[in-house]
């Protein structure tokens, strides 16, 4: 224990989810029912999530990575087709493109919104480009008017990575309903959680049915009913599918979380505003203001630490925060910083300068519905102590 009484006693875990008694009771009830795998809770979660997002069809899967992978297969993309995405994302976005047998192409971000730049997309279009995979970074929607115009003009599929953007709307329309597919994550650090989990939104019924089939080994529709009481049913394998289905235990957690999604959003919005106010005079670059015609999901609160202005490097800042018992994150080192992509695609960080700079300066501060007012004040106290 340190003598320094400005340091909190307990480590504040970054991105820790808020779990209430209802989730614990729901999991318990699910266990007692004996039906743990894909069943009625998954069907209910799909329906309630679909209604929340005002979408046509929803298919639950076991991760957003699986959701992205299946979306690209169901979109009919073929090996060698190019998919344009952002260099400022989690590796899963790019890996899913590669798993689908496709060729990832990066288009740099806009320095302020940190979202993929429409003009950079246009610059990267080739005769082999077949799809755009935008990520609504931190929960701020991409410029969907511009992106959909480009997609229409070049006849490209659009698959939205909405891992940060469950509550997001753009000009009143929910994210995940612009493109052909919208992919969501319920991983432990996301805005609502199921432990591991994901969802695909689709525009039409055939795409939803094929996604569902591919998520469960490629077995014919409603194969999960084969253990029910409606008499024995044979299943038939229609395609070589995957093991990507969500379990009822996960859906039971998700149903409880979904009930409080707006309440949690409001809690994160208050933290966001408190940070904005507390850091206004510090030499940090704060998140860009939220435009009036969008709804931000407030998934990440990211600040940029510029060594020239702050007197310390980003990595020194990360270490100082951790030493103050505050867990922080980096979203993200730009994709071309990683050795695998450098050696496989020859990507260099300097070729995507906006994403490179953000990746080298960014720090994500805790912004979860689990934080108490005191936790938020501890974060502020630590930062004002670290910076001049
Ligand atoms: C978390 C995340 C994913 C992957 O989600 P999983 O559910 O963990 O597979 C994909 N894209 C982005 C932008 C993410 O933040």
Image (cartoon, rainbow, N blue to C red):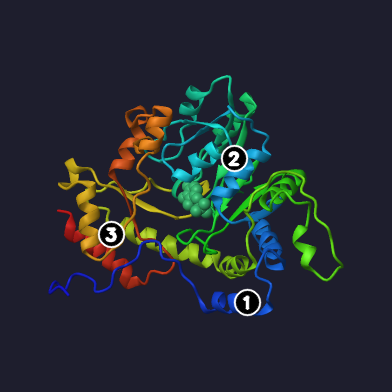
For disc 2, the neighbor class at 10 Å (few under 14, some 14 to 19, many from 20) is many
Q: Secondary structure at mark 1?
A: helix
| Residue 269 in which image quadrant | bottom left
Task: Report crowding for label 3: few under 14, some 14 to 19, many 20 or more residues within 10 A (C-alpha).
Answer: some
The image's mark for residue 278 is 3
Q: Taking 58 as reference, is 387 left or right?
A: left
Image point (63%, 60%), residue name: 246
Residue at (68, 78) in percent of width and height = 33
Q: Return the residue found at the far left.
A: 3
Dot 3 or dot 2: first in sequence order is 2
Q: Which mark is on residue 109?
A: none
What is the total number of numbered labels drawn onto the structure image? 3
Can see residue 139? no
Residue 189 percent across, percent down from the top left: 45, 60
Foreground: 124 or 171? Answer: 124
Q: Is residue 356 above or below residue 125?
A: below
Q: Which residue is mark 2?
A: 159
Mark 1 lies within 8 Å of ligand 1 (Cβ measured): no
């Amino acid at each position: 224990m340190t003598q320094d009484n400005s340091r909190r006693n307990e480590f504040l875990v970054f991105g820790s989810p808020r779990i209430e008694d209802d989730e614990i009771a729901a999991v318990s009830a699910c266990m007692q029912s004996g039906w743990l795998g894909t069943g009625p809770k998954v069907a209910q979660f799909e329906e309630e999530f679909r209604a929340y997002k005002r979408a046509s069809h929803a298919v639950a899967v076991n991760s957003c990575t699986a959701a992205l992978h299946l979306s690209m297969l169901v979109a009919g993309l073929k090996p060698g087709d190019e998919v344009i995405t952002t260099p400022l994302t989690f590796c899963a976005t790019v890996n899913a493109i590669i798993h689908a047998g496709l060729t990832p192409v990066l288009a740099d971000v806009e320095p302020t919104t940190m979202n993929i730049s429409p003009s950079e997309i246009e610059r990267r279009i080739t005769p082999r480009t077949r799809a755009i995979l935008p990520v609504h970074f931190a929960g701020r929607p991409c410029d969907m008017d511009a992106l959909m115009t480009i997609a229409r003009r070049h006849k490209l599929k659009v698959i939205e990575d909405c891992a940060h953007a469950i509550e997001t709307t753009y000009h009143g329309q929910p994210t995940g309903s612009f493109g052909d597919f919208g992919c969501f994550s319920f991983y432990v650090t996301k805005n609502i959680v199921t432990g591991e989990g994901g969802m695909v939104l689709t525009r039409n019924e055939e795409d939803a049915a094929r996604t569902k089939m591919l998520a469960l080994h490629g077995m014919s529709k409603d194969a999960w009913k084969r253990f029910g009481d409606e008499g024995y049913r044979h299943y038939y394998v229609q395609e070589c599918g995957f093991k990507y289905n969500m379990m009822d235990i996960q859906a039971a957690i998700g149903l409880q979380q979904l009930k409080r999604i707006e309440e949690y959003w409001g809690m994160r919005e208050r933290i966001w505003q408190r940070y904005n106010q507390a850091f206004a005079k510090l030499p940090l670059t704060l998140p860009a203001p939220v435009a009036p015609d969008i709804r931000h999901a407030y998934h990440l609160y990211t600040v940029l630490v510029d060594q020239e202005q702050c007197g310390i490097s980003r990595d020194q800042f990360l270490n100082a925060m951790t030493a103050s018992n505050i867990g922080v994150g980096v979203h993200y080192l730009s994709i071309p910083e990683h050795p695998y992509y450098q050696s496989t695609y020859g990507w260099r960080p300097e070729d995507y300068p906006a994403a490179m700079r953000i990746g080298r300066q960014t720090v994500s501060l805790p912004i979860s519905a689990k934080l108490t007012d005191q936790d938020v004040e501890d974060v502020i106290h630590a930062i004002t102590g670290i910076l001049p």
